[in-house]
Image: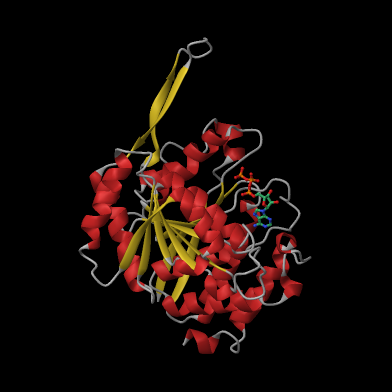
Amino acid sequence: MKTYRIATIPGDGIGKEVVPAGKRVLEAIAARSNDFGFEFEDFDWGGDYYRQHGVMMPADGLDAIRDKDAILFGSAGDPHIPDHVTLWGLRLKICQGFDQYANVRPTRILPGIEGPLKRCSPKDLDWVIVRENSEGEYSGVGGRAHQGHPIEVATDVSLMTRAGVERILRFAFRLAQSRPRKLLTVITKSNAQRHAMVMWDEIALEVSKEFPDVTWGKELVDAATARMVNRPASLDTLVATNLHADILSDLAAALAGSLGIAPTANLDPERRYPSMFEPIHGSAFDIMGKGLANPIGTFWSVVMMLEHLGERGAARALMTAIEHVTGDPTLHTGDLGGKATTAQVTEAVCALLASNSAVTSEAA
Ligand code: ATP
């Protein structure tokens, strides 16, 4: 029997509620299987750790999780600590330290969920956004000088390497090729950003030649926002730079009904390091500790983790259970206009996984 070693990092705010819920669901998955199980190790890194130690995670933290099979992450963010400290001190340290260069964000309108687009039927919105996750606008290159003086200056340099662009575009073409529509939209801004984005476009054309069966086109990022709203069915797989995809994927999550549902995977496609799975929402301090957080974004992230581990049957079973639960309005949390609690949603998903009815046939 295979045992997957999972690092769990709840982080801050509602991360401390949704990660234990995700763990509970993984345990329910393991209980169904004779082939695999999970061994969890919890890490208390985040805002509270920062208050005690002055850092979000220990200097040798990456070594403690390097040999795990996957990481389940909650969120990093604390109203009393600057955002750039919480982000760079934990999440980005892991993403960059483990070269998780492909950030993958699927978006669908799940059964029972009403999106804000009146003219869009749920089947019109089925996207995967691939975000470059290692360089670009968030490379961390830049600095400040003359601080506190009238001539103060600050730069953030968007850094794009041929290797970095090539690998993310190749990943996106491959992903688009694996989906039924084989359709890729390369998001760009080469009209205004006339150096790196022009190289991005050139490399897209080069890489596209390796994928003759993929239909692809370019779209300016500003035009893409309107297209996502007005013609959602014209999109399938999208690939964009770190900043562009960061913004587009929040729009996508909102169009799919709630930030609380959306999942993401930070992948090292070469599998040199563990990949990390997390809901896209933040720490949501306004609702923390009340048992109100929607755990579906975490559960869908667990689906992505199971797919990455090669447990496709279990991934399908969990996705089916999630869709049964979202289809029942009495199991909607507050962000979806309902009254259900994190615990009720979690128990409903686990009960479906435990019963041999609903989710077995789809998982076969
Ligand atoms: P951070 O600073 O860590 O990014 P934030 O509180 O500014 O966090 P988010 O947590 O991403 O931003 O979400 C914004 C709001 O959406 C929250 O304040 C909360 O009300 C709601 N929200 C986000 N995630 C969830 C969830 N899983 N369940 C219910 N509501 C949510």
Rendered view: 287 above or below 151? below
Residue at left offset 24%, top offset 51%: 203
* Residue 173, x across and y down, in percent: 31, 63
Residue at left offset 34%, top offset 48%: 99
Residue at left offset 54%, top offset 43%: 45
Question: How many labels sit on residues?
Answer: 0
* Residue 202, x across and y down, in percent: 24, 50
Q: Which image quarter is the N terminus in?
A: bottom left
* Residue 222, x across and y down, in percent: 48, 48
**Would you say 204 lies left or right of 322 here?**
left
Q: Nearer the viewer, residue 119 or 199?
A: 119
Q: Nearer the viewer, residue 341 or 334?
A: 334
The colour style of the image is secondary structure
Rendered view: 281 above or below 69? above
Q: Nearer the viewer, residue 66 or 153?
A: 153
Quadrant position of residue 194? top left
**Would you say 232 lies left or right of 164 here?**
right
Q: Could one spot residue 290 in this view of the protein?
A: yes
Rendered view: 81 above or below 337? above
Q: Nearer the viewer, residue 19 or 159?
A: 159
Q: Could one spot residue 270 in this view of the protein?
A: no
* Residue 9, x across and y down, in percent: 53, 51
